[in-house]
Amino acid sequence: MAFEVKDEGLAKQGEMNIEYADQNMPALREIRKRFEKEKPLKGMRIGMALHVTKETASLVRTLIAGGAEVAITGCNPLSTQDYVAAALAKEGVNVFAYKGETKEDYYRFLNKVLDFKPNATVDDGCDLISEIHSKRPELLKDLIVGTEETTTGVIRLRAMEKDRALKYPIIAVNDNKTKHLFDNFLGTGQSTMDGIMRATNVLFAGKRVVVCGYGDCGKGVTGRAKGLLANVIVCETNPIRALQAKHDGFRVMPIAKAAEIGDIFITVTGDKHVISVEHIKKMRNGTILANAGHFDCEIDVAGLEKEAKGKKRIRWQLDEYVLGNGNKVYLCAEGRLVNLAAAEGHPSEVMDLSFCGQVLALEYGIKNKGKLKPGVHLLPEEVDQSIAELKLKAMNIEIDELTEEQKKYLESWQEGT
């Protein structure tokens, strides 16, 4: 067993936080009970690059209960919860992570996980998978399956698939309905607001909040901003999503126009330089910038660093930049995903669904060893449905069942008007 964490003395607090998260993840606990009996992951070495949070620790415990050996690192330099990393190290997990990692340590830790020679991977953002393909191709021969947690990672994977560069099967857990319709919408919406408020303590009511991107995550962010009584503006490149935003009651305009009138800007697109330096130069004095996408390139932070005449850290995870015209803008969490860098990420209740998808995707991939071709795969709908059923049962919610007559009607075409 090997590990690198910031402070082993934080383990006790980590244990308590993991226990609290686990209490709020009843569906995952049910899978863990089954895994303890059946050991479907016996003999597997699972390499993980995920946000090292209390919820992720519950996922790790479930994989170990299923018989797997695990090595884990973070998937973002600012998202690790140090007390959780310490607790995992104390439990004997191979964990390499600390909050505030240098770029050098970030990639060194990815390679420590790969030194573990995994035969399955769990990724969030595709950095682990990318590192395997670009620098550690010798590992490909032993890889059975991988999973991908987030939208940005799936975008990268589909680009790899298009270029015929993806050499082993990856299950896009992000595309589970029990993931993106809940985690992306509910989790990102709430945790993004939480991160911005912890960094700034700003009042949202009455502010013009500009949300760049109206996918599942963007819909969640706009909904929470509206609930906080903000005046929400949406910027989009997709005409259908722009139309949705308009009919959901939001103003829609290009970012170049919104830059002149917004008070708080939130990017959640998965793309690069959505907010450019030219946009920032148009912004009003006191503007707040935050990113809720996976990587720190959605806001052109490097360009802002060059353009600014002055910079200082004025609060935890909040930097003040002075522009050439004297205006000040405030950047949350260094432009990294604000919900994890400045807060705790998604609530445990929603990660319960997402991480059920992770463990069942790994189980499915291992059971179908050799049957899945290299490329991006979806988890079968019946498995996705079973996750929702587990969650409903844990919440003591009953639903209707189709009668035999109703099933027959839905499966036939003869009966009409």
Image: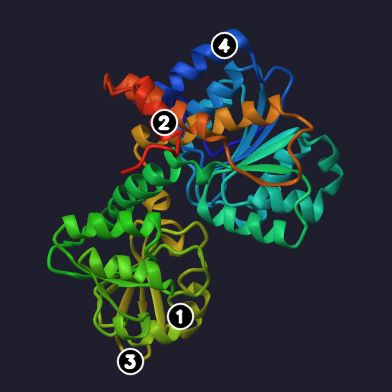
Look at the picture and state if 272 lies above or below 129.
below
Q: Amino acid at mark 4?
A: Glu
Screen quadrant of the N terminus: top right
The residue indicated by pointer 1 is 276
Mark 1 or 3 closer to N-term?
Answer: 1
In this view, the mark in front (1 or 3): 1
In the rendered image, residue 87, in percent from the top left (x then y), is placed at 50, 26
The amino acid marked with disc number 3 is Asn
Residue found 67% across the figure and 39% down from its top: 146
Q: CA distance from mark 4 to mark 2?
A: 18 Å
Q: Which residue is mark 2?
A: 352
Q: Residue furthest top?
A: 37
Query: Which residue: 39% across, 24% down?
Result: 389
Q: Would residue 122 be found to the left or right of residue 9 on screen? A: right
**In this rendering, does residue 16 appear at all?**
no
Q: Nearer the viewer, mark 3 or mark 2?
A: 2
157 left or right of 233?
Answer: right
Give residue 36's mark.
4
Indicate the amino acid at tag 2: Asp
Mark 4 or mark 2: name the one nearer the start of the chain.
4
With 328 as the anchor, is 340 left or right in this view? right
**Mark 2 and mark 1 residues within 8 Å of each other at the beta carbon:** no
Q: Judge depth for marks 3 and 4 and give the one in front.
A: 4
Q: Return the disc, 3 or 4, that comes first in the chain's sequence.
A: 4
Disc 3: CA contacts within 10 A as few (<14), some (14-19) or many (>=20): few
Label 2 SS:
helix
